[in-house]
Image (cartoon, coloured by chain):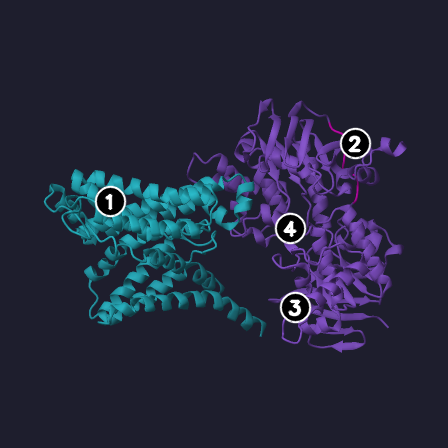
Chain colours: A purple, B cyan
Amino acid sequence: MSLLEMRQIRKSFNGVPVLKGVQLTLEKGEVHALLGENGAGKSTLMNILTGVIPRDGGTIEFDGQKLDHITITQSENMGIAFVHQELNLFNDLKVFENMFLNKEYVNRFRRLDKKKMRAECRELFERLGVEIDPDAVVADLKTSQKQLLEICKALHLNAKLIILDEPTTSLNNEEVDHLFGILRKLKEEGTSFVFISHKMPEIFALADRYTVFRNGEYIGEGKISETTPEEVTVMMVGESYSNAEVYEKRELGEEVLRLEDFSGDGFHHIDLGVRQGEIVGMTGLQGSGSSEMLQAVFGSSRSTGGSVKAFGKVVPRNSIHAAMKAGIGMLPNNRKENSVLPDMSLMDNMAISEQTLSAARLPVEGRRDRQRYDQYREMLNIKAQSSADLVTSLSGGNQQKIFIARWLNTDARILILDNPTQGIDVGAKAEIYRLILELSRAGKTILINTLEIPELMKVADRCIVFYDGSMIKELAHDEINEQDVMLYSVGITKDAKGA
Amino acid sequence: MKKFGKIWSEYSFIFVLIVIFVVYAITSSGLTWSGVMNIFRHSAVIGIVALGMGLICLTGEIDLSVGSMLALTAGFAVMVFNVTGSIALTLLFCLAFGGVCGCINGLLVGGVEMPAFIVTLATMLIYRSFSQYFCQHVDRKLIGGGSSVYKMDTAKDAYQALFGFGNGKIATIPTVGIVLIAMTVLFVYVSGWTKYGKKIYAIGSNFKAARMGGVNVSLMKISAFTICGILTGLGAFLWIAMNGSSDPATTGNSYEMYAIASVVLGGISMSGGRGKMLGVLFGAMSYTIVDKIIVALKMDSLINNAIKGIILILVILVQVAGPKLRSRFHRG
């Protein structure tokens, strides 16, 4: 008998159906990948299962029990735990306090029994091979440790089913491996997982079976061992998806960006030249300096020495405005935090950077902005109703296109893209790659920083691997492959391996 | 119906004003033109101060010092007038001095990145204390011979002209009311139709994204506080023109709170990025009418603040609870 059976689940929001009779079956002790683009209905289904929102119809059976009206507490007591993408931890409390929040042990005098809580915490961590100090303050933990702590919290409740919503977005590859090791161990002990992720390699490394949704409909399910990433992707996005190689070699122009002995917080002594129309990929584990270096080129992170020259002219350091005037634009990582102006319209979101450059002409140039907006909407294929809509009404991919338009609108000729496809679904990702290539053909010079190597294999002319604040290796387009990049980014060079 | 809902949520301040005005029309025995025009007169100072507050709130900050700043600027402006006898110099001093007071707040908040609540709480104490201290410790002649009030020298030639400006009317509309409306028009334009305004909204909406988009957040905050100071200076000028004197202990007392209340009543979000400057005018006028109602009903003026507070809670209650009720209704 299955651990979980959800049948014919239906749900509408304000009359718009988001789940049109979907199903999900889960066996005991399996990792089940729940796949689909953003908006396919994965999160809604999980929210129904955990009692966050009520369903309109359908049946749910968990552990042999029929569930009619689920409340959050009930689902928790039944052994269902939801590890959200945004971590629900209290940063100012200690690890064990988080662990036992609202379930504290007390002694006879209603005083907290910290000793017992600490001990139990330590025991659980040891069992799982998690290295976290129960007395550490959560704010001091690394993101990966926080993620593990969330999972430990779920296990501590004796969860039989743990839902993981994109648990690896902020982890580096080493940390992902560690996490997966722990998950496999738990799986053998009989815990089941629903694994929501956009990263195909991870899904194929970890999951046993999969279920695919598209636009709120159940598309299919099967064993991971009997399918391929391409097949699954086609199921997710429908017929429109093509995985054709889009990269082609181009004539590169003059050198337009030159870094000389460039140093700053987290990176040092970088020498690099980039030619017009070139797409340079940068990669490295978190903290390796690639992201920091690019931010310093844009002036948003501190640089301490060396120089940046764009189009032959020295760019004053540590000033975003100076970098913008020199023709540099940057799409920062973490869209929600660093790009989205949630209260403002699509047009205002697009125009804001250009408006800081042309601030001397005080009035808003509405007619011109509208023309430009229409032009970019068409060029970037932005799916939006009205330019007056809030930017938050768009999907992640379309939002990201608005922010690319923000920089095209400033006539930036060097574009720095820091993790441009973060949290974007597969179809939109492919579109962003195509866009990047198109822009480079139109003469834009592009620097991309990403942890996803397949992404670089699709677009980059060359790939620079960062390790410990320096460029450790440069790979030409044909040489880029995941294994080598991984080796270099953990500091193992080929020569050292041979010796 | 849906359209009405949108208008209601964006322009609720108009409905609030209409409701309060209707109550006023009923309670006051016989609505007169000059009575209505008086609303503009009595809204002038608080309205202009609230416009500056609105600009600051749009960036997501707050300025608690405006009331004290008003008292300090008004007091010093009286002395400037008594020495120079010049209206132009007095006005110039008000704007410049207010600007400097605001700039100090701005430098600490935008430049040093201290919390605005703390900084302006401190300058609120400082400015008020200065205005009271100097009143006691300057030459009596400077403050018009009074002991605890800055009094303008009525013997100066320009005095009548200034007092006439403060209490005069142009085509039956109070001059100071015209100044208020002109300032409102100016700031509605600045906030909605200039790049400066867009940047103000951007900072309040998400200051990190604004910074990454190239907006100089520090400079913008300094400028917003400075502009608020200049507007407060203008308010101080109107105050002395209307009253001919300024009591350092009571002038502008609690004005920071009335200004914030006007801003909130006008629909500007205290977390920044949302709302319209036009609402500030309506918010300030709504409160002035409440004063009038209380006078018309011959109630004890001490009940004044209680009623203002209740109105604020009611309006925000409707704004916050309304959407919740509506969604529950839809779900049910």
Circle on res. A396: 4
Q: Which numbered disc, 3 or 1, marks the residue closer to the eye?
A: 1
- The chain under label 4 reads A
| Magenta highlight range | A243-250
Q: Are marks 4 and 1 on the same chain?
A: no
Q: Considering the numbered disc 1 on the image, is that residue within a helix, a strand or a loop?
A: helix
B258 lies above or below A398: below
- The chain under label 1 reads B
Q: Are marks 4 and 2 on the same chain?
A: yes
Q: Considering the numbered disc 3 on the image, is that residue within a helix, a strand or a loop?
A: loop
**Depth check, front residue: A334 or B302:** B302
Quadrant in which residue A52 is drawn: bottom right
Residue wearing tag 1: B76
CA–CA distance in space, label 2 to label 1: 70 Å
Residue wearing tag 3: A52
Residue A25 in sight from this viewpoint: yes
Category of crowding for the residue at label 2, using alpha-carbon neighbours closer than 10 angstroms: few (below 14), some (14–19), many (at least 20): some
Residue wearing tag 2: A475
Q: Mark 3 or 4 closer to N-term?
A: 3
